[in-house]
Image (cartoon, rainbow, N blue to C red):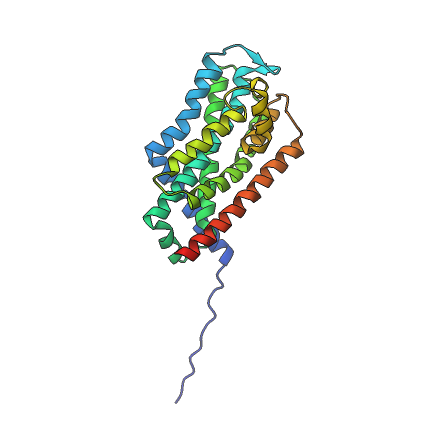
Amino acid sequence: MSTTALSLPSAPTNGLLRNLRIFAREARFEFVRLLRTRTFSLSVIGFPVMLYTLFGLLMNRGESLEGIAVAKYTLGSYAVFGLVGAALFGIGVGMAADFSAGWLELKRASPMPPLAYLLAKCCTAMAFGAIIVSLLTVLGIAFGHVHLTLDEYARMIAFTLTGAIPFASLGLVIALLVPLNSAPGIANLIYLPMSFCSGLWMPFKFLPHSIKVIAPFLPTYHLSQLMLGSLGAPMVGTTASHWSGLFGFTLLMLGIAWIAFRRREQNS
């Protein structure tokens, strides 16, 4: 007597759902890792909070600028400042450390989707940016008597999430082109002058004319103008020009990152 083995069809697996679970787990682990790295989390969150407390709440208490309170005006500029720091150091320096330790090669050898690593880094920068915006908002309302509507806060968060993408792309370029021992210095060399020239420390109207000519080529300038415009401050330029500037900068950085990655692959 012969028996025929019947094979039952296995339940179909949802590849998209599986990839989303992997991405969510990778993003959660990356966020927790950076949050527990005190040298990163305390500096990235503490630096903009300290500057906003000093220049937005204490030194210019009760003053107005561009038709709105200084505490509200600087809330937008230091929110951008904090977001840029989270992206450049979390992605640029963080990925440079992963490259140096060989961690990225291990990730690529695993069955994890290739984009999960990069998306987790980007989402972590967005999360830290949202934390910084929320902390600055609480400080402004509690100690600076900032009147902020729910719609204004929602727009600040939206600009933070979308604005993280251009600076995540810049961080990727730093990670691919700069070795680990030089990455923090190069990141600061980009971060600090770019913030000053965009009016994040000093209102744009008070900057020298030579710097105002340079500012439109900087992504921090475009994001800060959008952020300040959402808070009711007069915006230099149009909304379309600022979004175009951010989009063009993102494409440029992604193109440079792709070329750098291909060369890195050929040399390895």
The residue depicted at 44 percent of the width and 25 percent of the height is 48
Outermost residue on the front side: it is 210
The image quadrant that residue 89 belongs to is top left
Specify whether 186 is left or right of 241: left
The residue depicted at 50 percent of the width and 37 percent of the height is 167
Quadrant location, the C terminus = bottom left
Along the viewing direction, whichever of 34 and 186 lies nearer the viewer = 186
Along the viewing direction, whichever of 23 and 241 lies nearer the viewer = 241
The residue depicted at 57 percent of the width and 39 percent of the height is 249
Specify whether 206 is left or right of 48: right
Q: Indicate the position of residue 263 as horizontal and vertical percent values.
A: 45, 53
Q: Indicate the position of residue 41 as horizontal and vertical percent values.
A: 37, 32
The residue depicted at 43 percent of the width and 82 percent of the height is 4
* Res 151 seen here: no
Quadrant location, the N terminus = bottom left
Question: In the rendered image of this protein, does residue 6 appear above or below residue 50?
Answer: below
The image quadrant that residue 189 belongs to is top left
* Res 220 seen here: yes
Along the viewing direction, whichever of 249 and 37 lies nearer the viewer = 249
Outermost residue on the top side: it is 62
| Total count of labels | 0
Q: Indicate the position of residue 154 as horizontal and vertical percent values.
A: 57, 30
Outermost residue on the bottom side: it is 1
Q: Indicate the position of residue 50 as horizontal and vertical percent values.
A: 41, 21
